[in-house]
Every structure is written in structure tokens, then in C-alpha cells.
Image (cartoon, grey):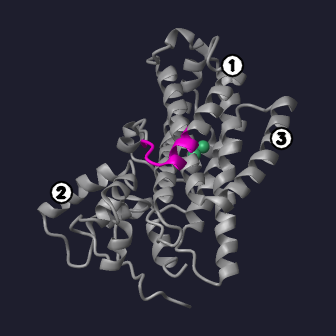
């Protein structure tokens, strides 16, 4: 197996992002990475900031407390805390993470960002009008119809991007720097969201037709766009996920009775939030058996925030830079990929 001498990360930390966030790589005391890796990931203040993940705050807090008491030699304190959280499937979010997701916006800095944001705003406006979400009562059916359609679209970019990077790796006979797995995980995560929601709402022929046509167009357009500019595509998905976080935050507030436009929320949506979560959701996110649909919405929102931060981060990386978001256990396995 080939091993790049320039890439020998020696990072021990929490699963997924926090162990590898740019700020962590740029200075947290418990991280040990090569100077070359740091240089690649910390090329500018802006890039480092953009690579931050919403989980990072907690990781930094843990890191700060870890520095106050000496850790066992060679053992990262964060590994102990998350040893039981190493999951092959969905992410396990702590209560603090679920409640702490913020609606963030990554400001535009380049033309490519502006084009991506404009495209997303245009799509959002059309989607709001076409789905009737921006007018009339917000009912459970309206919400489910919207999220099912959203998830069928959201599952495309990760699969396309992962496939193209896979083919590029084969074509050029070189490693991928471990992006492929994250991208495929994102696609699988989105598909699971869709499966959770279709257990509660069976799409009619019109919605199925929309999904079919939408996929036909979006898959091919995204294919061409990713060949032309992966940076644009990841930024586009980053902004798409910002909107997804916004949508799920609104649904959560509506279910809790705290939405700004609560007068538009139908009583059945509040009741739906209190209904039991489906078995698939409980197994996927390893939720308590008594979890509700409101809890499911919190978990989905955390996943979307994860996609948002990862895609904005990918857009700031060069395509041959190592993936800083890979799952900790997988990271060690995929060190040569
Ligand atoms: Fe999703
Ligand atoms: Fe997403």
C-alpha cells in the first residue's frame, strides 16, 4: 500500500469533525500533526475559520478542561469520552449538540460564492411558493411533503461528488485524501432522512413525478458542474444545507409552539411533534425508545448542520488536501486513501 511521506497525520480526538477542525489543527494543545499538514490546512485565517464545525465549540471546551488536568501519556481525553459513540451508521448527537445548532451563514467572498448563494436563494423562493409553504396554514402534510422532496434532492450531490472523486482517483492512479467516504456518508445520511419521513407520508404520483424529473435534471447538471468547479458545487451544497437548517429550525419551533408565525401553524403539526418516533429513526440515531418526532427533527437538523459545515469546508480546501472531517476510527483506517 502506498503511503505519502508528506501526509502522516497523527491526530487523536473525537469522532468526525472536532478532532480535525482547522482551529484545532491550528493550535489546540492536544493535537499532534505534522507541520506540513498544518501548513496545508491553515493557509489563511479565513480558511481556518470556514473549516469550523458546529461541534467544535464543545470540543474546544473539552480540550480546555483537559488541559487543566494532566492526561495519561499518549491518551487523548476526548477519545475516552466518545469511545461508545463510534457508530457505523448515523451520527449520535449529544443533547447539547442537538439543542445548540445555530442558523449560521457563511458570507460570500468570491464570485463563485455569490453565484452559488444567488442560485440557492432563487431555488428556495420558487420552492416556497410552489410547495405552498410560504402561504396558508403549515400542516403536517405540508411539512412532510416538503422534507421528502428536499431529502430526495439533497441525497444527490454527495453521491455525485463521491463518484467523481472515486473515478478521478482510479483514472489518475492516485489517492483521494479520504474525501470519498465523507461524501458517500452524506448521501446515505440524506437517503435515510428520506426513508424516515416516507414512513409517515406516502408521496402521490405528482410528487413522485417531480422527484423523477428533478433527479434527471439535477444529477446531470451537478455532474457537469462538479467537473467544471468542485468548489462551486461544495459552496452550493453548503448554502443549500444552510437553508435546510433554517427549514428544520422553523419546523422545530412550530412543533414547540414558539415559531414567529405560530398563528399559521396547524394544531396537527404540534401534535405530530409529540407523536412517537419511528423505529428506523430510533435505531439510526440510537435515540431513547420514548423519543418523539420532535426529537427526530432535532437529529435531522444536526445532520444538516454537519453537511453545511463540511461542504463549506470542502469548498475552502484544494481537492488534494486531506479531508479534515473524516470519522476518527475510519480516519486511521483510511490514512492511505
Ligand atoms: Fe437531510
Ligand atoms: Fe443535508
- Image point (69%, 43%), residue name: 153
Disc 1 target residue: 132
- Image point (38%, 42%), residue name: 95
> Who comes first in sequence, dot 1 or dot 2?
2
Residues under labels 2 and 3: Cα distance? Answer: 52 Å
Q: Nearer the viewer, mark 1 or mark 2?
A: 1
Instruction: Bin the neighbour count of mark 3 within 10 Å (Cα to Cα): few under 14, some 14-19, many 20 and up.
Output: few
Instruction: Quarter of the image for the C terminus: give it.
Output: bottom right
Q: Which mark is residue 22?
A: none
What residue span does the magenta drawing correspond to?
106-117
The location of residue 133, given as percent across then percent down, is: 64, 20
- Secondary structure of the residue carrying numbered label 1: loop
Is 127 a magenta residue?
no
Q: Place residue 146 in its image quadrant.
A: top right
Q: Which mark is residue 213?
A: 3
Label 3 residue near ligand 1, CB within 8 Å: no
The location of residue 82, given as percent across then percent down, is: 37, 60
The residue most toward the top is: 263
- Image point (74%, 50%), residue name: 221
Q: Is residue 314 left or right of residue 50?
A: right
Instruction: Quarter of the image for the N terminus: give it.
Output: bottom right
Nearer to us in this view, 40 or 215: 40
Vertical relation: 102 (above or below) 27: above
Vertical relation: 94 (above or below) 180: above
> Who comes first in sequence, dot 3 or dot 1?
1
Label 2 residue near ligand 2, CB within 8 Å: no
Q: Is residue 76 left or right of residue 229?
A: left
* Camera sees residue 66: yes
Q: Place residue 271 in its image quadrant.
A: top right
Disc 2 target residue: 65
Amino acid at each position: 500500500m502506498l503511503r505519502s511521506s508528506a501526509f502522516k497525520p497523527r491526530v487523536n480526538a473525537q469522532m468526525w469533525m472536532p478532532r480535525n477542525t482547522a482551529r484545532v489543527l491550528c493550535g489546540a494543545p492536544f493535537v499532534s500533526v505534522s507541520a506540513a499538514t498544518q501548513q496545508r490546512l491553515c493557509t489563511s485565517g479565513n480558511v481556518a475559520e470556514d473549516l469550523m464545525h458546529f461541534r467544535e465549540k464543545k470540543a474546544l471546551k473539552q480540550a480546555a478542561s483537559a488541559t487543566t488536568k494532566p492526561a495519561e501519556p499518549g491518551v487523548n481525553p476526548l477519545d475516552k469520552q466518545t469511545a461508545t459513540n463510534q457508530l457505523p451508521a448515523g451520527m449520535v448527537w449529544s443533547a447539547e449538540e442537538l439543542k445548540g445548532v445555530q442558523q449560521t451563514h457563511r458570507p460570500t467572498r468570491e464570485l463563485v460564492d455569490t453565484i452559488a448563494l444567488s442560485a440557492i436563494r432563487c431555488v428556495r423562493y420558487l420552492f416556497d411558493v410552489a410547495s405552498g409553504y410560504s402561504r396558508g396554514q403549515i400542516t403536517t402534510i405540508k411539512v412532510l411533503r416538503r422534507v421528502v422532496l428536499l431529502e430526495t434532492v439533497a441525497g444527490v450531490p454527495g453521491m455525485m461528488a463521491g463518484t467523481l472523486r472515486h473515478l478521478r482517483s482510479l483514472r489518475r492512479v492516485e489517492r483521494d485524501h479520504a474525501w470519498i467516504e465523507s461524501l458517500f456518508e452524506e448521501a446515505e445520511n440524506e437517503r435515510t432522512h428520506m426513508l424516515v419521513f416516507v414512513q409517515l407520508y406516502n408521496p402521490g404520483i405528482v410528487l413522485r413525478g417531480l422527484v423523477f424529473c428533478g433527479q434527471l435534471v439535477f444529477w446531470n447538471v451537478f455532474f457537469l458542474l462538479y467537473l467544471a468547479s468542485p468548489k462551486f458545487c461544495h459552496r452550493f451544497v453548503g448554502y443549500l444545507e444552510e437553508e435546510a437548517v433554517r427549514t428544520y429550525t422553523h419546523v422545530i419551533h412550530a412543533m414547540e409552539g414558539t415559531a414567529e408565525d405560530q398563528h399559521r401553524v396547524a394544531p396537527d403539526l404540534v401534535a405530530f411533534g409529540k407523536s412517537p418516533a419511528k423505529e428506523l429513526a430510533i435505531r439510526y440515531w440510537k435515540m431513547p425508545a420514548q423519543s418523539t418526532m420532535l426529537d427526530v427533527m432535532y437529529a435531522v437538523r444536526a445532520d444538516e448542520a454537519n453537511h453545511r459545515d463540511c461542504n463549506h469546508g470542502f469548498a475552502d480546501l484544494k481537492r488534494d488536501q486531506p479531508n479534515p472531517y473524516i470519522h476518527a476510527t475510519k480516519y486511521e483506517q483510511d490514512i492511505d486513501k
